[in-house]
Amino acid sequence: MDFRIGQGYDVHRLAEGETLWLGGVLIPHHKGTVAHSDGDVLIHAICDAMLGALKLRDIGTHFPDTAAEFKNIDSKILLKKSYELVKQKGYEIVNIDSTVQAQQPKLKPHIPQMEQCMANVLEIDVDRVSVKATTTETLGFEGREEGMSVNAVVLLKRT
């Protein structure tokens, strides 16, 4: 059986008056991500992990932030399109593991909804999608609430 592992990382700046989308879920918070798309840093890292596993480059190659067609796009669409590229190569998701680094807001109450939302988009069992959240103990740009970052790992297998 042929397996591939991909790793993804993304960062977005936070600003007052912006919306905060994570894992396809709108999170209530006084700050949101600054981005060309809806700024869903979690989905973007997962897309990069899927694409990287199959040497399909990165999310910016397929959905450039200079293209008008992707302005304010719902990142769930990018997730679906990224997975379609994976399936075209003859692979499927075994599992996804991700960690959001953010000082605020507290994400624990939203994690089940994020996992379910992404599982629905990907048409996989929710048990294959793991989202964790951590603070950086007030250290770094995440700790100062200037931005948030996500690390994601995806395991794919040939169908």
Image (cartoon, grey):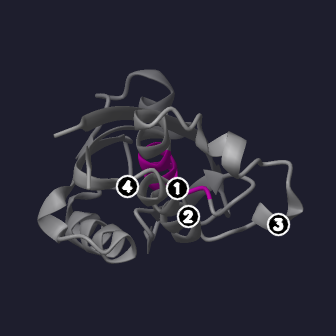
SS type, badge 1: helix
Which mark lies nearer to you, 2 or 1?
A: 1
Task: State the extent of the magenta-drawn residues as a range.
Answer: 39-47
The amino acid type, in three-letter code, at marker 2 is: Lys
Residue 137 in the image, given as x and y percentages of width and height: 28, 28
Label 1 and label 3: CA atoms lie apart by 18 Å
Type of the residue with mark 4: Pro
Q: Residue at x 36, y 34 (%)?
A: 6
Q: Nearer the viewer, mark 4 or mark 3?
A: 3
Q: Nearer the viewer, mark 1 or mark 3?
A: 1
Are dots 4 and 3 in contact, CB under 8 Å? no
Say left or right for 125 vs 122: left
Question: How far apart are labels 4 and 2 at the CA level?
Answer: 29 Å
Contact check, label 1 and label 3, Cβ < 8 Å: no
* Residue 46 painted magenta: yes
- Density class for disc 3 (Cα within 10 Å; few <14, some 14-19, many ≥20) is few
Q: Which residue is mark 1?
A: 85
| Mark 1 and mark 4: Cα distance apart in space | 33 Å
Q: Is residue 90 left or right of residue 147?
A: left
**Measuring 23% from the left and 37% from the top, which residue is drawn there?**
3
Question: Contact (CB < 8 A) between labels 2 and 1?
Answer: yes
* Residue 3 in the image: above or below residue 26: above
Which residue shows up at 39% across the image and 22% down it?
Answer: 139
> Amino acid under label 1?
Leu
The residue under label 3 is 69
Residue 146 is left or right of residue 3, and the answer is right
The residue to which callout 4 is attached is: 105
In the picture, the quarter occupied by the C terminus is bottom left
